[in-house]
Amino acid sequence: MTSSARLVIVGPQGSGKGTQGARIAELLRIPAVSTGDVFRANIAEGTPLGEQVKAITAAGDLVSDELTGQIVRDRLSQDDAARGFLLDGYPRNLHQVGDLDTFLNGRGEQLDAVIELSVPRDESMARLALRATAQGRTDDTEEGIAKRLSIYESETAPILDVYRERGIVDSIDGVGTLDEITERIVAALTARGITRPAAV
């Protein structure tokens, strides 16, 4: 059994990766590091980073690799991430894969698994439209959603090819109840020897 759980969860917007990532991180007792949550918290607090991110996302664009990488490296250097972590929203392109590799290699570490949540595009669109209504998310306009899904398909999907070559991708059907999807992920991780740590 592996003593570490260094994971990445990948999927299009609306795939449920935030929800599943939080569930899996809690089960494995590792921090879930969501770049989106970090950005939204800063926006809510009105920090300089938040103002910067707000302007970028309002235009429907993505935060720069440099800024995102800086935030992730800082978070993964904190004590609670020493035994593992689950990254949600990073890396999102090939450049960020290289940055993460460099950072982990410098610590003598590597990723243990990449969870891919597979969801059809129309399903993602429908879920995001519902979320926009429920949460009042101003960035979830139909045009904004379509733009972000296109960016995912052109920039983020290719990172899975890199990780597949390393044999660490588990492709999970992201359609079903929350519990069904969580069970599929847990089964895939267990098959890799990644299991919940014994209670201390």
Image (cartoon, helix red, strand yellow):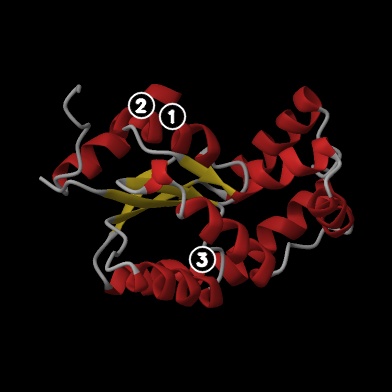
Mark 2–mark 1 contact, CB under 8 Å? yes
Q: Judge by depth and name the residue closer to the eye, 126 or 159.
A: 159
Are there few (<14), some (14-19), or many (20+) residues within 10 Å of tag 2? few
Please, is residue 150 above or below residue 125 in the view?
Answer: below
Residue 67 sits above or below residue 194 on the image: below
Does the image show residue 11? Answer: no
User: In what quadrant of the picture does the N terminus appear?
Assistant: top left
Q: Residue at x 22, y 37 (%)?
A: 187
User: Which mark's residue is nearer the viewer, 1 or 3?
Assistant: 3
Q: Earlier in the sequence, mark 1 or mark 3?
A: 3
Instruction: Say which of 124 and 139 sits in front.
Output: 139
Seen as rendered, the residue at the extreme front is 79
Residue type at mark 3: give it.
Answer: Ala
Q: Amino acid at mark 2?
A: Glu
| Position in image of residue 136 (x %, y %) | 83, 29
Q: Is residue 23 above or below residue 125?
A: above
Q: Are marks 1 and 3 in contact (CB under 8 Å)?
A: no
Give the crowd class for mark 3: few <14, some 14-19, many >=20 residues within 10 Å: some
CA gap between label 2 and label 3 equals 24 Å
The alpha-carbon separation of the residues under discs 1 and 3 comes to 22 Å
Q: Picture coordinates of residue 169 (x, y %)? A: 31, 59
Marking on residue 180 = 2
* Residue at x 45% of width, y 68% of height: 100
Read off the residue under disc 3. Answer: 157
Q: Residue at x 22, y 32 (%)?
A: 196
- Determine which residue is flagged by label 1: 176
Of 55 and 130, the residue lying toward us: 55
